[in-house]
């Protein structure tokens, strides 16, 4: 399909384990965003990639969180030593040029930390 | 004060009703504005952009009031399928889009 693709759609892990979440943006989109959404809450910004520029990591809640974007396309969000409070839906979005445009979201990864 | 604020609702209205939501923003340098719709357990999807002159798309009308720093969304002739959470999004140039927490709409028969 031509939309933003995220995998896995669901991830259950044990506290203390590391997890990797993947996002494949729309082809040609230069901007990529990670957000997370806890149940009944709004979207919390995590990290933003724009082309080859250094990412904006200002939303990452702790140093257990990191992300990379390889070749300006696929992005991986890594959470180390997961905690129960990390349980949320992790949403990836992309836009063609930058933040002033509409965002296209993937269907998210539901992360559950037991 | 939060950068983007919305009344969480829920707004509970009968089919056919007209309902309006507001979203206030704190930064006067904000440049672009959007309304997104999010269905339960689904990802947000763009509903409409909000232009300075206001814009209309079928039963939906969006308006911007820069002087009072708010945007609005009006839904006419509500349908059961309009039940969702409506998120407003405010952008400041190259800054990250800021999402409101959303307003929940429930349309009942």
Image: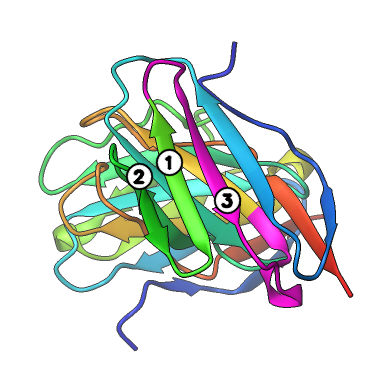
CA gap between label 2 and label 3 equals 11 Å
User: Quick one: SS at disc 3?
Assistant: strand
> x%, y% of residue B11?
81, 48
Q: Nearer the viewer, residue B32 or A88?
A: B32
Mark 3 and mark 2 in contact (Cβ < 8 Å)?
Answer: no
Which chain letter matches label 2? B
The numbered dot on residue B74 is 3
* Camera-side residue of B91 and A68: B91
Which residues are drawn in magenta? B66-85
* Mark 2: few/some/many CA within 10 Å (<14, 14-19, 20+): some
Answer with left or right where residue B27 lies relative to residue B77: left
**Residue appearing at x 41%, y 47% in the figure:** B34
Q: Mark 2 points at which residue?
A: B54
Colour scheme of the picture:
rainbow
Residue B93 vertical position relative to residue B63 in the rendered view, above or below: above
Residue B107 in sight: yes
- Say whether residue B78 is magenta: yes
Residue B51 placement (x, y as % from top left):
30, 43
Question: Where is residue A96 drawn, in percent x and y?
Answer: 19, 59
Secondary structure of the residue carrying tag 1 is: strand
Q: Earlier in the sequence, mark 1 or mark 2?
A: 2
Residue placed at 48% from the left, 37% from the top?
A45
Q: Which residue lies furthest to the bottom in this view?
A: A1
Q: How far apart are marks 1 and 2 (CA)?
A: 4 Å
Disc 1 marks which residue?
B63
């Amino acid at each position: 399909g031509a939309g933003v693709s995220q995998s896995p759609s669901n991830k259950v892990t044990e506290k203390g384990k590391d997890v990797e979440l993947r996002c494949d943006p729309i082809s040609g989109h230069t901007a990529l965003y990670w957000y997370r959404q806890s149940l009944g809450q709004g979207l919390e910004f995590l990290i933003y990639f724009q082309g080859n520029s250094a990412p904006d990591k200002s939303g990452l809640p702790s140093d257990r969180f990191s992300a990379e974007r390889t070749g300006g396309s696929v992005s991986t969000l890594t959470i180390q030593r997961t905690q129960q409070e990390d349980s949320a839906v992790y949403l990836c979005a992309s836009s063609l040029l930058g933040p002033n445009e509409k965002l296209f979201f993937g269907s998210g990864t539901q992360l559950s930390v037991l | 004060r939060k950068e983007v604020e919305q009344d969480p609702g829920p707004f509970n209205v009968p089919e056919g009703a007209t309902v309006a939501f507001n979203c206030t923003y704190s930064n006067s340098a904000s440049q672009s504005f959007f309304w997104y719709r999010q269905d339960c357990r689904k990802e947000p999807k763009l509903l409409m952009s909000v232009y300075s002159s206001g814009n209309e798309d079928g039963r939906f009308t969006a308006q911007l009031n820069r002087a009072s720093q708010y945007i609005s969304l009006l839904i006419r002739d509500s349908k059961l399928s309009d039940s969702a959470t409506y998120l407003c999004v405010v952008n400041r140039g190259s800054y990250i889009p800021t999402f409101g927490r959303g307003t929940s709409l429930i349309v009942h028969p």
